[in-house]
Image (cartoon, rainbow, N blue to C red):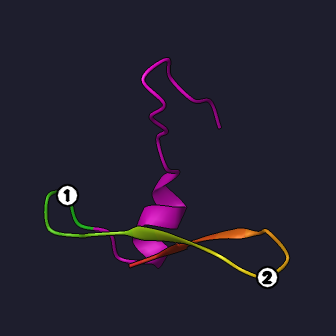
Amino acid sequence: MRITKEFQVTLPREVIESITILPEKTDIEFLQDNNGRWYLSN
């Protein structure tokens, strides 16, 4: 996955479909665990 110069990424379709992200209707946040790993939450 590449990051644009504006720090944007394009999520693969299978990821979008598996977590039900809807354009302009889904808010997401990033959570970090105690080991420093980042997770996407919706």
In the current view of this chain or complex, which residue is farthest to the right? Answer: 35
The kind of secondary structure the magenta stretch mainly shows is loop
Counting the numbered discs, the total is 2
Q: Where is residue 15 in the image (x, y as percent from the top left)?
A: 52, 64
* Element assignment for label 2: loop
Point 23% across, 66% down: residue: 22
Q: Distance between the residues labelled 2 and 1?
A: 31 Å
- Categorize mark 2 by other alpha carbons within 10 Å: few (<14), some (14-19), many (20+): few
Residue 41 falls within the magenta-colored stretch: no
Q: Which circle's residue, 2 or 1, is located before the other in the chain?
A: 1
- Categorize mark 1 by other alpha carbons within 10 Å: few (<14), some (14-19), many (20+): few
Task: Please provide the residue range marked out in magenta.
Answer: 1-21
Q: Which quarter of the image is occupied by the N terminus?
A: top right
- Residue 12 lies left or right of residue 19; in this view the side is right
Image position of 8 with respect to 18: above or below:
above
Point 38% across, 79% down: residue: 42
Q: Which of 4 and 37 is in front in this view?
A: 37
Asked if disc 2 and disc 1 are in contact, CB closer than 8 Å, the reply is no
Report the residue marked by disc 1: 23
Image position of 26 with respect to 11: above or below:
below
Point 35% across, 76% down: residue: 20
Point 79% across, 82% down: residue: 34
Amino acid under disc 2: Asn
In the current view of this chain or complex, which residue is farthest to the front? Answer: 34
In the current view of this chain or complex, which residue is farthest to the left? Answer: 24
Amino acid under disc 1: Pro
Disc 2 versus disc 1: nearer the observer: 2
| Disc number placed over residue 34 in the picture, else none | 2
* Element assignment for label 1: loop
Image position of 15 with respect to 8: above or below:
below
The image quarter containing residue 6 is top left
